[in-house]
Amino acid sequence: MRFLALLVTAFTTLALTAPAASRAEPVAEPGPAGEPVTLDTDGRRPTGPCALRGITDSVSEAADTPPGFAPSNGTVRAVTLFVDFPDAPAEGTPQERYAEFFPAVADYYRTSSYGRLDYRSTPVPRWIRMSRKYAAYGIERGTPFERGYRALSKEIIDAVDDTVDFRRFDLVNVLVTPNAGPPATEDVQSVTFAGAPTGLTTGDGVPFKNVSFIWSRQTGNSPYRVLNHENAHTFGLPDLYYTGRGSGLLKTPVGHWDLMDEDWGPSDDFLAWHKWKLGWLAPGQVECVLTPGPRTVTLTPASVPGGTKLTVVPLSRTRAVTVEARARGPLDHTVCRPGVLVTTLATDVPSGAGPVHVSDATPGSDGCWTTDPNVNPQLSDAPYVVGERFSTGGVRVAVTGRDADGNWRVTVERLRPPSSRLSRPASGSARR
């Protein structure tokens, strides 16, 4: 811990003064500890008829992320700031708070992106003391920027504007002392303001946006992932869990198959659609099924680099069925039933309203991961295995084989061409 703190401080001095690297050639830059980092530049943003359009003014499942969000592949730079309050002074050092998240956050992105996202965080290792008590800012879950965060953000900008060149960074992290506000087990307050300007501008003329505020501490063995979740909003990803009340629907329609739904507890990876949207898949790793008839695809699990990662079957201009393989791996810790994961997604359904649904191959079961309250057990055994089939909206998916390397052979059949008519996301049906 002590060595890490010294290393972080030394790196901060270098990073705040070094010239920004060009995005055109992000293939061999020194990493945070000075080690060479080689980026895989084969990742591409989604294109073609399966790159469905949708909501364009906010986070969403639309394949094309609108301007204003942070880049999500290549070298991405974050400045990380630290905040405490007069009535909640920090109980540890900024370096200790920083070590709760780094290098784990950067390592997670590097692994999930197959080396296509090199996340660089530059910490400013001092506590920025707010002028008022915590309660004076009116921060609670769901607080909009204007009501509570504007005053907080203005003080933060004023405190560091003379030393931080915000032009060098793609996003901003604010790590609040964890003793400010309620514990995360009582009220989750971490939030991100992404894409659209907040109305504040730094002294460098940079709009203050794509900023993630992290409060308290999450429980479980990978609590750092709250920052991966929040930063993914700056990349354009929506919340997959239901944020409203009284919907009568499963609150976690994706479960532990994507950290935009469940980011507590054991580690979980992103859905393949999200990896495609973020530019982490090469063109040859995505199969787009448009014409009627069967197509056989061999899918490699998300936990293994290379191979086909995603099959997309559009149902309409804003609806699709996606097919991918999942197995336990470096990020997918809770996969207790390896197999083929099928989802239905809607690119025009907003964040927090259930834009993605995982089809459960074993409906009515208690699941196979039942020991952690942070994991939705009902969907833990959702993947389809050999001999099982899924069907919805004129699309059939049959799992026909698994080879010795753990790759899955799947036959995807569409019975009719895609429709231009809009429809609600289908839940699908499972049968053996």
Image (tube, rainbow, N blue to C red):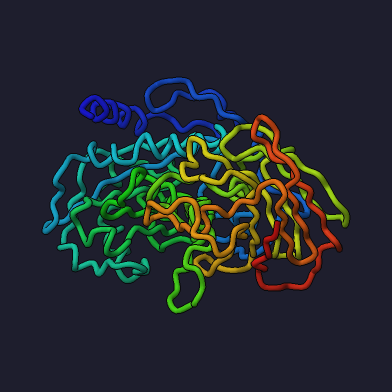
Task: Note whether residue 207 is visible.
Answer: no
Q: Is residue 317 above or below residue 94?
A: below
Q: Nearer the viewer, residue 68 or 291?
A: 291
Residue at the image point whose x is 51% and y is 35% from the top: 111
Question: Residue at position x 50%, y 24% from top?
Answer: 37
How many numbered markers are drawn? 0
The percent coordinates of residue 200 (x first, y second) are: 38, 60
290 sits left or right of 74 in the view = right
x and y percent of residue 355 in the render?
58, 64
Of 416 and 366, nearer the camera is 366
Above or below 421: residue 305: above
Residue 41 spot, x, y in % from top left: 62, 32
Give the residue at the far top of this rendering.
Answer: 35
- The residue drawn where x is 71% and y is 58% is 390
Q: How far across and down, in percent of the image, does residue 299 sit? A: 70, 40
- Dividing the picture into quadrants, the one containing residue 221 is top left
In the rendered image, is residue 181 in sight? Answer: yes
Q: Which sits in the foreground, 1 or 388?
A: 388
